[in-house]
Amino acid sequence: MSIKGQSFSGSPTGAHIATSVGNAGGLYAGGFTVMFLAKSASSNTGFLSGWSGGVGGTSRGGLLFAIAKLFGEGDFSSGFGEGNFDDSVWRWYGYGKDPGSAHYVMHYADLATLTWSHGESSGAGNHSDTGTSDAFSLGMNANYALGYDSGDRAAGSLWTSHLSSSAIEAACTNAASALAAANPAAGWLFPEATSGSPIVDFTGGGADETSRSFIATSPDPVDFDFTLSSPFRGGQALPFML
């Protein structure tokens, strides 16, 4: 299911899928990389938040775009990108940073051509490591009272290290198998055909769905192959993804 959020609420009751953190609990405790395949018609969209104390507790970090530019949580720069992400085009979006006090590095590419842009936003400042998480919210960033639409999501992955731009380009293609081959700490696929089943972390690391709020199905991106070449979870073969 390319998941589609139906609520613009900025609170934890807004559109999102909550998951355990599994092997990715240390995402914001050091260097990290977050990547999502998504589209939206809204200029304000939340992709992911990490939480301590459960969803809506203490925020550890998150990825969003506001005024149709990419931002990391706590990022008061001018944003990164051309400011036209609210155009319902499927793109890979993401960010990461090195351990310790460091700038966020942003990444995006349209799925159709995989033409990448990597860099820092104008006025970027340093950001510290913020600690471990015990829950993730996919599709929501609840720290902003304005509210962030969840848009449509097709895939996402997290790494507890800062990937190079070339490594991101190799992982984030038009095939889920490339994403899995990049050894993320957690990863999710949302093909429409599996919309009635719980979302599981395709790495087998345990960052599985615990609840969902205001989620609907929407058509899959035509340029993305959800098939995993070795779809195993916890040592057990699974049909397709779920």
Image (spheres, rainbow, N blue to C red):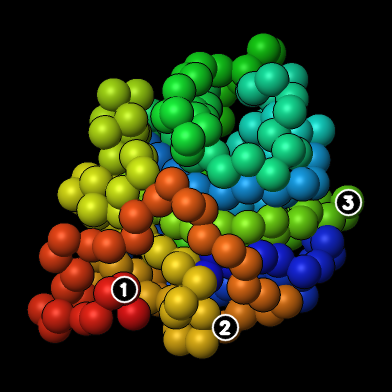
Q: Residue furthest right?
A: 146
**Furthest-top residue in this view:** 122
In the image, is residue 150 above or below residue 159?
A: below
Which quadrant holds residue 142?
A: bottom right
Does the residue at mark 1 contact the one at mark 3 (Cβ under 8 Å)?
A: no
The mark that comes first in sequence, 2 or 1, is: 2
Report whether 108 appears left or right of 55: left
Crowding around mark 3 (Cα neighbors within 10 Å: few <14, some 14 to 19, many 20+) is few
Q: Position of residue 195 (x, y in %)?
A: 51, 80
Query: Which residue corresponds to mark 1?
Result: 241
Residue 118 point in image, percent of width and height: 47, 20
Mark 2 burial class by Cα count in 10 Å: few <14, some 14-19, many 20+: few
From the viewer's perspective, tell me whether residue 135 is left or right of residue 24.
Answer: right
Q: Residue at x 35, y 24 (%)?
A: 165
Residue receiving disc 2: 211
Which residue sits furthest bottom?
Answer: 196
State how far apart marks 1 and 3 are (Cα).
34 Å
**Residue 120 visible in the snapshot:** yes
> Residue 48: percent from the left, percent from the top?
57, 55
The residue that disc 3 covers is 146
Image point (75%, 39%), residue name: 86
Among numbered discs 3 and 2, the one appearing first in the sequence: 3
Crowd band around label 1 with a 10 angstrom C-alpha radius: few (<14), some (14–19), many (20+): many
Element assignment for label 1: loop
Amino acid at the residue labelled 1: Met
Dot 3 amino acid type: Leu
Can residue 205 be seen in the rendering of this structure? no
| 130 lies left or right of 151 | left
Mark nearest the camera among 2 and 1 is: 1
Give the mark nearest the N terminus, 1 or 3: 3
Residue at (33, 33) in percent of width and height: 168
